[in-house]
Image (tube, helix red, strand yellow):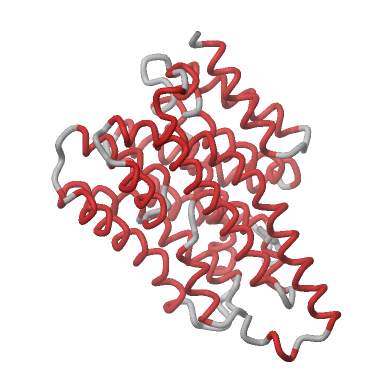
Amino acid sequence: MDHAQTMTSADQFGRKEAIKKGLVAGLPIFLGYLPIAVAYGVLAKESGLSTFETTMMSVLVFAGAAQFMAAGMFSAGAMFVEIVIATFVLNFRHFIMSMSFMNTTKAFPLRWRFPLSLGLTDETFAVSSLHSNQAKHQYGTYFYLSLILFAYVGWISGSLAGALLGEVIPQALSESMGIALYAMFIGLLVPSIKKEWRLGAIAVFSMGLNFIFMEVLSVSKGWAIVISTIIGSFLGVFLLKEEDES
Amino acid sequence: MIMLTIIGMAIVTMVPRFLPAFLMKQSTFKPWVNRWLNAIPFAALGALIFPGIMIDVFPKQPLVGIAGGVVAAVIALTNINVIFAVIGSILTVYLLTM
């Protein structure tokens, strides 16, 4: 953006290429977000939010699970403080994810790291981490930016569509879409495990921890995921090799 | 009031996201810290998948979520685009709960 004047044609090609790669990497998130965002839009409208409020929540919050939860809480008559605190707890996992992503992208200047960090969701973080080699490229910033913006556009437009089309979508179908995010997580995880079993061991360990925290110790979902991620990833200290790219 | 709540949600979501951008300034960490940070995506994915997939997808029938997850995993094993795993699992859940 700001160094456009000094750009040579070769640089420009590199930047275009980075943007294109980012869009390709972001396409599954974009497509996966659409049905989920539509389902969110329908639910939020049913909970009494206006089309504008439903869409603005996607623009400002950009966190699927928290938005579904908030829609449910609004319809249950929950108040400001309850919803905000529940959102904080549920989204605190992004702090841990951002630490990992900021370590990957530590070569980027802060004016890039700051806006990129705001676009971190479970999905954009997971896909970005699987493309951590892009952080070494000259135009890696554009790669992550286009990946995140593509996902963001999908999330917002899906929410708007859901809010507008609400009743047109059969309920059985919108209920079935709840699996979509989980399928995306699995779809991102499985190919990595196929390449490196140690990564699977970390994921399974973390699943077990999360099960114990949620089902046995009855810790709230948000904190359970945060604690399981922190403890689970410590297994990587012993299992992974230094050069293991994530 | 709803708009105010949404703005409150946005603030408590944004702050944890951007804080590490300012905190993680150290240029190089000890190797074990790097290994820990590199493992976070996989630990996070694990915790995000389970046990949520049993509880959230179809609370009354945990096996429906599991079935959708197994279908997604099998499709993902073929290394085709993630989107096919998503479509396959939606269809599975839809057919199982029709």
What residue lies at 71% left-to-right and 90% top-to-bottom? A5
Q: Residue furthest right?
A: A10
Q: Please name whichever residue, B34 or B87, is drawn nearer the observer in this view of the structure.
A: B87
Q: Residue furthest bottom?
A: A6
Query: In the picture provided, is A45 more to the left or to the right than A62?
Result: left
In which image quadrant can residue A185 be found? Answer: top right
Q: Please name whichever residue, A192 or A124, is drawn nearer the observer in this view of the structure.
A: A124
Q: Please name whichever residue, A12 or A69, is drawn nearer the observer in this view of the structure.
A: A12
What residue lies at 41% left-to-right and 35% top-to-bottom? A164
Query: Is residue A77 in view?
Result: yes
Count of numbered tags: 0
Q: Is residue A83 above or below residue A174?
A: below
- Where residue A242 appears, as percent x and y from the top left, is 67, 66
What residue lies at 59% left-to-right and 61% top-to-bottom? B38
Query: Is residue A224 in view?
Result: no
What residue lies at 53% left-to-right and 45% top-to-bottom? B45
Q: Residue furthest top?
A: B98
- Where residue A234 appears, as percent x and y from the top left, is 50, 57
Query: In the picture provided, is A149 more to the left or to the right than A79?
Result: right
Query: In the picture provided, is A170 more to the left or to the right than A224?
Result: right
- Where residue A111 appears, as percent x and y from the top left, is 52, 81
- Where residue A232 appears, as percent x and y from the top left, is 48, 50
Q: Is residue B62 above or below residue A216?
A: above
